[in-house]
Image (cartoon, rainbow, N blue to C red):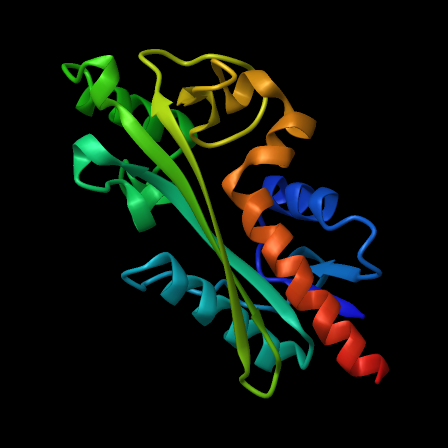
Amino acid sequence: MDLVLATTNQNKIAEICQILDGQNLNIISMNDIPSLPEVEEDGFTFEENARKKALTIAKLTGRLTLADDSGLVVDALNGRPGVLSARYSGDDATPAKNNEKLLHELEDVPVKKRTARFVCVIAIARPSGKVFVAEGECEGLIARELRGEQGFGYDPLFIVPDREKTFAELGASEKNKISHRAIALENAAQILRDLLDTEKG
């Protein structure tokens, strides 16, 4: 079964492909279809953005499409950066600038109050307009400095308490067992299996 990934982010594509490996899917990313437009993420929630991206690309390609919207929710910042995680430091945001801003805003916050979670919402859309949603969360703490060389985005600042390491220190294979995206994709995989069974039927 063909599955279009509504993203051009190579890091996300690699993670999704690794986690969905073995699901009998022919995975196609937006990078494989250059004519597809970027879908503006203007929703107020992760689910709104994921649904919009999945539906838009599904209708344009005529194929089953998976989109995710994910981000970092920090309790001491009243949920920021949230849906603005990728653009947290402004229009010219980069991961380095986003991490720098986050560290600055949490400069005076003690360790016990640096609680946060990564949230991922996945939408799977049919071209007909039917949408299925799966979610995942991973609880953690925000470090006081960048730690680790792997991963992307806020990974060098996100500590997984029971491992006492950041996502960037864990490495891809370990991260992809416990991350918010892994949990959401595990739930999404069941949806995809059900859809595949329906098609076979």
Q: Residue at x 25, y 23 (%)?
A: 114
Image coordinates for residue 175, horizontal then vertical, percent = 60, 29
Residue 34 visible within the image: no
Q: How many marks?
A: 0
Relative vertical location of residue 43 with respect to residue 12 in this rendering, above or below: below
Q: Tell me what residue is drawn at x 54 percent, y 72 percent.
A: 132
Instruction: Report whether 87 appears left or right of 59.
Output: left
The quarter in which the C terminus is drawn is: bottom right
Res 119 → quadrant: top left
Q: Quadrant of residue 18?
A: top right
Q: Is residue 189 left or right of residue 118?
A: right
Residue nearer the viewer, 36 or 115? 115
The residue under the point 41% across, 14% down is 146
Measuring from the top left, give residue 38's x and y in whole percent.
Answer: 50, 62
- Considering only vertical position in the picture, is 18 above or below 112? below
Residue at the outermost left position: 108
Left or right placement of residue 157 versus residue 55 in this view = left
